[in-house]
Image: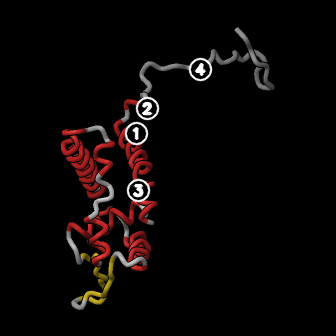
Amino acid sequence: MTTFPTAKNADTPAPAGPRISKKKPKLSNFLCFAIYSANLAFGRAYKPILDELGLTYTQYIALVALSERDDQTVGELGEKLFLESNTLTPILKKLEQIGLISRRRDPQDERQVRVSLTPKGEGLIDADPGASLTDATGLGDDFDAVQQTVARLRDNLLRATRDEREKPE
């Protein structure tokens, strides 16, 4: 056995080499990593499409969310996008500057800002710039089922973490 002399003990045995545990998890077995890396791949796939439009992915999904239900408050839109208002506000300001949305104070509650698509924003969404990515996923007829499964997974995890936070200590 090889030893490494030290000031404390001149007869300390040398490490036997890297320990390999048969029970260590593999990265390829982590569902969270598969989803994380798929998210990165989606970002790379969307980038050239959105670069051509002068948009970021977050700006684009904000427009999509507004196309589903127009005239939302910043808070409602933030909930849908999982973004805090202090993150969302600069994104919305930029979208307003380039003429894709309008923002206005809610006449019923001046503290609230309401957001709507402009005709230019509606036209961009109607053009469906991300449609080509459905084919790029290679999921074919399974696309809707996979999307629904991932959304259910997200909702279950959010519910579980919310329930955990609400438990009395």
Name the one closer to the observer, 53 or 77: 53
| Amino acid type, residue under disc 2 in the picture | Leu
Within 10 Å of the Cα at label 2, are there few (<14), some (14-19), or many (20+) other Cα atoms?
few
In 3D space, how far apart are the residues under numbered discs 2 and 4 (Cα atoms)? 18 Å
Mark 2, mark 4: which one is toward the viewer? 2
In 3D space, how far apart are the residues under numbered discs 2 and 1 (Cα atoms)? 7 Å
Q: Position of residue 96 (x, y in %)?
A: 39, 79
Could you say whether the residue bearing mark 1 is in a helix, strand or loop?
helix
In 3D space, how far apart are the residues under numbered discs 1 and 4 (Cα atoms)? 25 Å
Q: Report which quarter residue 109 is drawn in.
A: bottom left
| CB under 8 Å between discs 2 and 1 | yes
The residue that mark 2 highlights is: 27
Within 10 Å of the Cα at label 3, are there few (<14), some (14-19), or many (20+) other Cα atoms?
some
Could you say whether the residue bearing mark 2 is in a helix, strand or loop?
helix
The residue that mark 1 highlights is: 33
Could you say whether the residue bearing mark 4 is in a helix, strand or loop?
loop
Picture residue at 62% right of the left edge, 17% below the top: 17
The residue that mark 4 highlights is: 18
Comes first in the chain, label 3 or label 2: 2
Could you say whether the residue bearing mark 3 is in a helix, strand or loop?
helix
| CB under 8 Å between discs 1 and 3 | no
Within 10 Å of the Cα at label 4, are there few (<14), some (14-19), or many (20+) other Cα atoms?
few
Residue found at the far top of this picture: 1
Q: Position of residue 168 (x, y in %)?
A: 27, 57
| CB under 8 Å between discs 1 and 4 | no
Name the one closer to the observer, 13 or 56: 56
Comes first in the chain, label 1 or label 3: 1
The residue that mark 3 highlights is: 49
| Amino acid type, residue under disc 1 in the picture | Phe
| Amino acid type, residue under disc 4 in the picture | Pro
